[in-house]
Image (cartoon, helix red, strand yellow):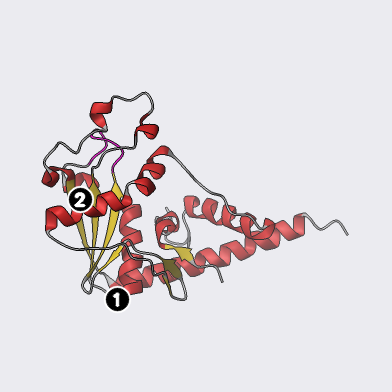
Amino acid sequence: MHKFRASSLGDIMSDPKSSKEPLSAGAKTVCEKLAKQLVYGYTESISSKYMDKGLAVEDRSIELVNSVLFTDYVKNTERRSNEWITGEADIVTPTKIIDIKSSWSLSTFHALAQDGMNKTYEWQGRAYMWLWDVEAFEIHYCLVNTPEELIGFESETLHQVEHLNPALRLSRVLYQRDRELEEKIKIRVEAAREYMDQVIAKIAAEHSFT
């Protein structure tokens, strides 16, 4: 049974236009892609300069958080799963999960928490809260220097930022756990699995030449 990654859970959680439909059109498209991957035995890797920076500076961003909040957080390496979802949170504490998001540049950094509200990240956090059985999830938007090889033709003044007050380079968005939404995840994942099974069967039927 396919388990949805916390980071991609938002792909299937958008509400359909009709209450009679179990999945939105966008969720169906995602399920069709996943079904194809299962049939043909491949995975599609997605990369971008934003993701490359996030991976490159993750430790530096955690250092920023610790310096501002006077904490000693360390990167989590445990992956957890239940019957429906799987995920590996960035930072785990006894009371909350923290997800590190390293902003690409000054121009993309969310200076106000309200600007950092994001449904995809929210569903990711709700998955983590469920998997680790904690009551809160925080997104930490961090602004640290971009590695020179990634900057390209953009102005370095947007990327060399560590001369700024560290407190100005950290924004936090808080979400509280909602068990009703966890039930919604269960329902949506089961609907997605059922649709994926239908797509897999259709692929098999269309490619049966005997």
Q: Write down the residue under mark 2.
A: 64
Residue sitting at x 76%, y 55%: 206
Q: CA distance from mark 2 to mark 1?
A: 26 Å
Residue 92 at x, y percent in the picture: 28, 68
Q: Quadrant of the N terminus?
A: bottom right
Quadrant in the picture for residue 139: bottom left
Confirm whether residue 117 shows in the render. Answer: no
Where is residue 36 drawn, in percent x and y? 64, 55
Label 1 neighbourhood size at 10 Å, few (<14), some (14-19), many (20+)?
some
Q: Is residue 159 above or below residue 169?
A: above
Image point (68%, 59%), residue name:
39
* Residue at 48% across, 54% down: 27
Main secondary-structure element of the magenta-colored stretch: loop
**Label 1 amino acid?**
Asp
Whether residue 66 is in magenta: the answer is no
Front-most of residues 45 and 54: 54
Q: Which quarter of the rendering shows the C terminus? A: bottom right
User: Which label sits on residue 133?
Assistant: 1
* Structural crowding at the residue carrying mark 2, measured as other residues with C-alpha within 10 Å and reported as few (<14), some (14–19) or many (≥20): many
Say what secondary structure mark 2 lies in: helix
| 1 relative to 108 in the view: left or right | right
Q: Give the image location of residue 35, x and y in percent.
A: 61, 58
Q: Is residue 107 magenta?
A: yes
- Please state the extent of the stretch shown in magenta in the rendering: 103-109
